[in-house]
């Protein structure tokens, strides 16, 4: 059985970092197209067709990647909420059970 050991802010940090990744990814796609632009005259045949197709679909590719990242981000947020709820429930249950426990009955006396 595996055990997860992470701080209470780990998923919050992960969610925050993932939310900014979409903008960064869009910027990188634009930079890739701009960087390859001087090479377009050197492409021929299938290579040129593939690059032209990529360039024409760059906005859709960016939107699809952002949509996927948004779904991942929503999942991370839901996982964070589930862990926080579980943590609170566990603490509340432990406090309630400790309040009802008879600790005197558990003492071992040898005399």
Image: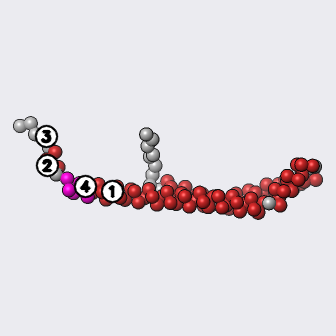
Q: For residue 104, which numbered disc appears in the image?
A: 2
Mark 4: few/some/many CA within 10 Å (<14, 14-19, 20+): few
Marks 3 & 4, CB-CB < 8 Å contact: no
What's the residue at 13%, 40% (across, down)?
A: 108
Q: Quadrant of the C terminus?
A: top left
Residue 95: horizontal and vertical position, in percent?
27, 57
Please report whichever mark, 3 or 4, sits nearer to the chain's N-terminal start.
4
Badge 3, how many Cα within 10 Å: few under 14, some, many 20+?
A: few
Q: How packed is label 2: few (under 14 Cα within 10 Å), some, or many (20 or more)?
A: few
Q: Secondary structure at mark 4?
A: helix
- Marks 2/4 in contact by CB < 8 Å: the verdict is no
Residue 99: give x, y in percent of width and height: 21, 57
Where is residue 29 shown, x and y percent of the image? Answer: 76, 57
In the picture of the structure, the residue carrying the numbered disc 4 is: 97
Residue with the mark numbered 1: 91
Is the residue under label 2 in contact with that under label 1 (CB below 8 Å)?
no
The answer to if 21 sits in the magenta stretch is no
């Amino acid at each position: 059985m595996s055990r997860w050991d992470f701080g209470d802010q780990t998923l919050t940090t992960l969610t925050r970092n993932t939310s900014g990744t979409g903008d960064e990814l869009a910027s990188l796609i634009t930079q890739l197209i701009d960087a390859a632009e001087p090479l377009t005259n050197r492409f021929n045949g299938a290579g040129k067709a593939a690059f032209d197709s990529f360039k024409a679909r760059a906005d859709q590719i960016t939107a699809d990647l952002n949509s996927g990242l948004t779904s991942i981000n929503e999942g991370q947020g839901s996982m964070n909420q589930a862990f926080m709820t579980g943590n609170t429930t566990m603490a509340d249950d432990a406090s309630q059970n400790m309040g009802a426990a008879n600790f005197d009955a558990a003492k071992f006396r040898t005399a």
